[in-house]
Image (spheres, rainbow, N blue to C red):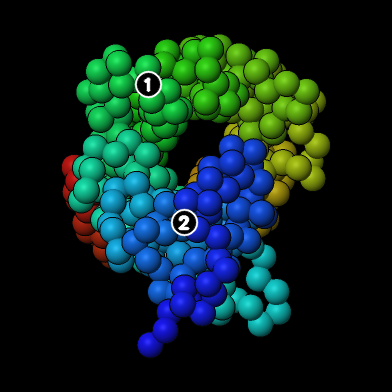
Amino acid sequence: MPTSADIAPDRPSVAALLEQVRDLTKHNRWQQLASLRSHLSTPLRAEELEIADGVAFALGQLGDADGAANLLAAACAIDLTHRRASALAYVHYNALFACARARPGKGRGAQLAADRERHRQAFLRWTRAALDLQPDSIKDLYRLGVFEAQLGNRRDRPALRAFERAIDAYRRLDDATRERRGDLRKYYAKALYAAARSALRLGQVDRARKHAFACLRADDGHDHVEPVHKLYLAGKICAAAGEHDHAERALRKALDAAGKRKPDYLYGALAAACFALGRLDDAHAWIDRNVPPPRRRPDMWRLLGDIAHRRGDVDAALAAYEHALRGDRAGRHLTLHRIGDIHLAAGRLAKADSAYRRAAEFRRKRFASEDVRALEGRLAVADARGDEAAAAELRAALADARARARKRRRRR
């Protein structure tokens, strides 16, 4: 059967095409480089691999993920190298981010989900291939960590393992390689930051601190990670460690680093630090003066409720908690605990029990786990009512829930 090379005898030579690829790449002329695809043979020939690599890169730059992936897959079928497998994984990695940003139009939800799954499987396949060929590939390990933490099932435990493998691989590089491969410093800094974030989510505060402060040192003067993000994370870690004065200092620095557009979440974090230090007026002012009510997130309303409650203004606290419940998809149970506590203290036992039950139901549906705090509240309600049978049942359920919670913490 004749090949496309036989059909198109006037095609430029491989040498001429290679020269064009190098020149167009040098000048970032992606559209022209992508157009060279028409000169490639079907099926692809071994002598055209370098041309195919360049054309695939241009297609990726232009957002044609499928075109880039198909061409790279054909090249891998001829000669599977680490660089080629990594490039193919990267194409699918970028496509996953595009899927995450996409807003499905009418009737496109199923297609978007199918595209996401296709790119997910391909990313894992080619990342495994790349790491089989080069187990210490810092870029591939970093991207695998990002996939686990953000693009896959949002699993911080495997993400942390991947980030720490990338960190260790960079630290094992000799000075000459670090000097020659300056591009790897960025991935090292970003892996440190991401490892700290995942460790914090897992409740491993000491591990998070180690990576966060290593990131601040390693990235000083480079800013591969935005200073506002590094400092905010450092502040959150200090707060998790109970070092609220250090948290406030880090968050103030983050606020200075943010430039003109200050993110609302910084004001919320500063308010939380001041609240923990007992400075209620400062805590209230950080939110009240800087974040208008329509922009306040549920956790800010919850904190405003806590401030009002600490001041003894129960009505204001309940009003803020009601605001916090609106549209809260993650921390609704935390607000309902507080509402239940207020009603319990006031002797409104039916309202207290209702709030605790709603908290337990939300946590069960949202996180598939028992709500120990809600069970404690319901037990307090049963005791206040003198309902010994209900109290005995709740004590047993509470003991089981606490035992399961201890097992989960040990697995971390």
Q: Quadrant of the N terminus?
A: bottom left
Image x and y of residue 45, in percent: 37, 66
Give, as a three-letter code, the residue at label 2: Val
Position of 163 relative to 349 (above/below): above
Q: Residue at x 63, y 78 (%)?
A: 108
**Marks 2 and 1: CB-CB under 8 Å?**
no
What residue did someone put label 2 on? 14
Which of the 4 image quadrants contains residue 386?
bottom left
Q: Is residue 88 visible?
A: no
Answer with the quarter of the image where residue 218 lies: top left
Secondary structure found at label 1? helix
Report x, y in % for residue 208.
Answer: 35, 28
Residue plotted at (51% across, 79% down): 7
Q: Is residue 368 left or right of residue 6?
A: left
At 30% from the left and 64% from the top, the residue drawn is 78
**Label 2, label 1: how many angstroms apart (C-alpha)?**
30 Å
Q: Does any portion of residue 111 appear in the rendered image?
A: yes
SS assignment at label 2? helix
Q: Is residue 361 above or below residue 342?
A: below
Q: Residue at x 22, y 48 (%)?
A: 133
Hey, what amino acid is under mark 1? Arg
Q: Is residue 129 above or below residue 158?
A: below
Would residue 19 be found to the left or right of residue 243 on screen? Answer: right
Where residue 53 sits: x, y (%)?
45, 53
Residue named by callout 1: 180
